């Protein structure tokens, strides 16, 4: 065995207190990672009232807590959102009190254009789902706005382009709301400008625009990013004043373009959409005037010509009357002659009818009828006599054929037949009656031998109580009176129940033999 | 025809009605008296359009903002 114990490995290392060790770790970490850039996906983000932003940075295997102090957070061009790919710049620090370390972020930016586009697409889908881009939300742009509000940078080519094009087409009142068009202040200022223009009361100190143009020149996706921010998109969608967006070049599309009522590819194009060309309108007005005058002149000319034509075609009043007058004259001429002719015609018909009416003619006809009547009357009496004679002769002839002797003979013969038949009938009847009588007597005798009276002769008797035959002692006791029939007559005996004086039904007195029991 | 007085019409309203009036007159199916009335109305509408076209005055101003970004007034903008 060794004299000296072999101590466990490391036991000769110096001992730290926890604070010492934590302090050493802190110094080491803060020294080593005083400026780092880390690429990560943003995890959970929390924004307490303090204004600081706490968030997790993560990849598929590790998580790093992060904090963005209030002052830094308000300056950021891109606010971190969950799911965003970012590159965060900052320093690591530890919390010795909790055995934790975290990154204090000084800047955070989307990790490349791909990440930005992905985020943009996600936001677009989300806002579209809310209906902010719906076609039915779009309002028409006024034909000729009085006041145009332009939200853009007050310096730069954009506002100049817009003003130039407006001046060419139709000079208007223009109110410029100056805003930052890139960087962190861009989105809040643009949103505020849109809302501010909408808040102006019509007829107030500041004239309320009829139309808004939100404009910015071309730039990188990061430069234009402010116009993709939700507050700007919501402000544009909520604007009561029709709004044209003209952000970037034709190929750049920002989310405000979807929420705007019209999208212009360039600021100049926005000015063209905003107003019509004044010269064209003046020419148009002159043309309307000319067309109107011409139309009226034509209308009057056409009617005048028509009037002339019609009046030419109108006949003179005399000519109109000539024809009828001629007809009247002719008719007047023909009238007396026609009357005369009608009278004559009537006359002729009357004379013709009257000619046939002569008394002689009538008398002749009456004479002829009377002659015929007389001739008929004369033939009437001989004819009747002849008919009567003929009828009588026929009667006599038939009467002569009626002979009473023959009828008498027939009657006598029938009477004889009848007598014979009656005798036969009588004979047959008495024979039959005799036979029936004998049978009846025999039957009666048999009846008597079988009847109860024959039994009486042998010493039996029939007892009747109150008219009915009594066959039991109980019935005999119940009867008021008993009759006993013998062979030669009946004998009456009073029953055990003499008739009651009153007809009232009383319980029957008990039989005497029962009374003796008590 | 609307009941709105011509003097209160916007350019666009006056323009639309003027077009309708001209169309009616050109169709020629309006009674003579009515067409004269139409013509008179058309003349008023055209005058209204011209008034609005003559109001072509350029006036550019920028809004001035206070510390909190609220509008306080305007300042004329020139030279753009």
Image (tube, coloured by chain):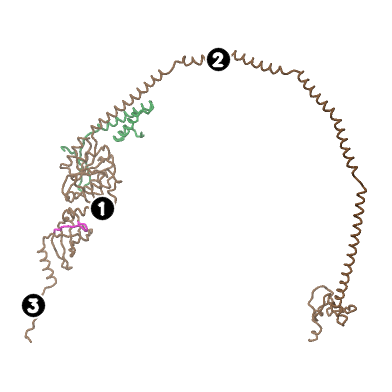
Chain colours: A brown, B green
- What residue appears at the point 52 percent right and 15 percent down from the top-left corner? A327
Label 2 marks a residue whose chain is: A
Which of the two discs, 3 and 2, labels the residue nearer the N terminus? 3
Label 1 Cα crowd, 10 Å radius (few <14 / some 14-19 / many 20+): few
Residue bearing the label numbered 1: A125
For the residue pair A208 and A267, the one nearer the viewer reads as A267
For the residue pair A493 and A155, the one nearer the viewer reads as A493
Q: Is B25 rendered above or below residue A507?
A: above
Task: State the image quarter where residue B7 is shown.
Answer: top left
Q: Measure how far apart labels 3 and 2 are at the Cα level.
A: 165 Å
Helix, strand or loop for disc 2: helix
Q: Is A309 rendered above or below residue A44?
A: above
Residue A323 point in image, percent of width and height: 49, 15
Q: Nearer the viewer, mark 3 or mark 1?
A: 1
Same chain? Circles 3 and 1: yes
Same chain? Circles 1 and 2: yes
Taking the image as shown, residue A210 lies to the left or right of residue A4, namely right
For the residue pair A221 and A357, the one nearer the viewer reads as A357
Helix, strand or loop for disc 1: helix
Reply yes or no: does residue A84 show up in magenta.
yes
Same chain? Circles 3 and 2: yes
Residue bearing the label numbered 2: A331
Q: The N terminus of chain B is located in which quarter? A: top left
Helix, strand or loop for disc 3: loop
Residue A261 point in image, percent of width and height: 26, 44
Residue bearing the label numbered 3: A12
Q: What stretch is highlighted in magenta?
A: A80-89
- Marks 1 & 2, CB-CB < 8 Å contact: no
Which of the two discs, 1 and 2, labels the residue nearer the N terminus? 1
Label 1 marks a residue whose chain is: A
Label 3 Cα crowd, 10 Å radius (few <14 / some 14-19 / many 20+): few
């Amino acid at each position: 065995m060794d004299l000296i114990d072999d101590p466990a490995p490391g036991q000769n290392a110096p001992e730290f207190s926890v604070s010492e060790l934590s302090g050493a770790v802190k110094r080491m970490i803060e020294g080593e990672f005083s400026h780092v850039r880390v690429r990560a996906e943003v995890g959970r983000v929390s924004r307490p009232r303090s204004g600081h932003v706490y968030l997790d940075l993560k990849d598929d295997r590790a998580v790093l807590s992060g904090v963005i102090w209030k002052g830094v957070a308000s300056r950021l061009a891109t606010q971190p959102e969950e799911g965003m790919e970012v590159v965060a710049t900052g320093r690591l620090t530890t919390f010795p009190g909790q055995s934790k370390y975290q990154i204090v972020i000084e800047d955070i930016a989307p990790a490349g254009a791909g990440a930005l586009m992905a985020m943009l697409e996600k936001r677009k889908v989300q806002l579209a789902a809310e209906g902010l881009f719906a076609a039915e939300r779009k309002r028409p742009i006024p034909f000729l706005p009085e006041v145009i509000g332009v939200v853009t940078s007050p310096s730069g080519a954009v506002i100049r382009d817009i003003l130039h094009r407006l001046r060419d087409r139709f000079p208007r009142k223009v109110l410029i709301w100056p805003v930052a068009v890139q960087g962190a202040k861009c989105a809040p200022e643009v949103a505020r400008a849109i809302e501010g223009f909408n808040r102006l009361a019509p007829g107030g100190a500041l004239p309320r625009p009829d139309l808004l143009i939100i404009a910015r020149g071309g730039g990188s996706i990061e430069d234009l990013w402010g116009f993709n921010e939700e507050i700007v998109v919501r402000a544009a969608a909520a604007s009561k004043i029709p709004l044209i967006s003209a952000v970037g070049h034709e190929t750049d599309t920002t989310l405000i373009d979807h929420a705007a009522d019209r999208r212009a590819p360039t600021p100049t194009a926005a000015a063209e959409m905003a107003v019509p060309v004044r010269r064209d309108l003046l020419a148009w007005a002159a043309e309307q005037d000319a067309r109107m005058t011409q139309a009226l002149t034509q209308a009057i000319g056409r009617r005048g010509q028509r009037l002339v034509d019609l009046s030419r075609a109108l006949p003179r009043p005399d000519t109109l009357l000539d024809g009828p007058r001629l007809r009247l004259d002719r008719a007047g001429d023909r009238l007396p002659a026609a009357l005369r002719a009608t009278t004559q015609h009537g006359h002729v018909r009357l004379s013709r009818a009257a000619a046939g009416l002569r008394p002689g003619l009538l008398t002749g006809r009456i004479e002829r009828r009377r002659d015929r009547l007389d001739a008929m009357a004369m033939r009437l009496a001989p004819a009747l006599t002849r008919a009567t004679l003929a009828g009588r002769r026929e009667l006599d002839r038939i009467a002569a054929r009626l002979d009473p002797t023959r009828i008498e003979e027939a009657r006598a013969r029938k009477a004889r037949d009848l007598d014979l038949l009656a005798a036969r009938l009588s004979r047959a009847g008495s024979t039959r009656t005799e036979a029936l009588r004998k049978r009846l007597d025999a039957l009666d005798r048999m009846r008597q031998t079988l009847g109860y009276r024959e039994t009486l002769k042998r010493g039996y008797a029939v007892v009747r109580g109150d008219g009915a035959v009594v066959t039991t002692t109980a019935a005999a006791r119940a009867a008021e009176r008993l009759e006993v029939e013998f062979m030669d007559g009946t004998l009456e005996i009073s029953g055990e129940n003499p008739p009651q004086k009153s007809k009232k039904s009383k319980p029957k007195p008990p039989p005497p033999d029962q009374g003796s029991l008590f | 025809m609307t009941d709105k007085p011509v003097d209160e019409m916007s350019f666009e309203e006056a323009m639309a009605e003027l077009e309708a009036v001209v169309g009616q007159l050109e169709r020629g199916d309006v009674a003579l008296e009515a067409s004269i009335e139409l013509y008179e109305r058309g003349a008023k509408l055209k005058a209204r359009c011209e008034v609005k076209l003559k109001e072509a005055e350029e006036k550019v101003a920028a809004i001035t903002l206070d510390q909190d970004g609220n509008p306080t007034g305007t300042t004329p903008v020139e030279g753009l």
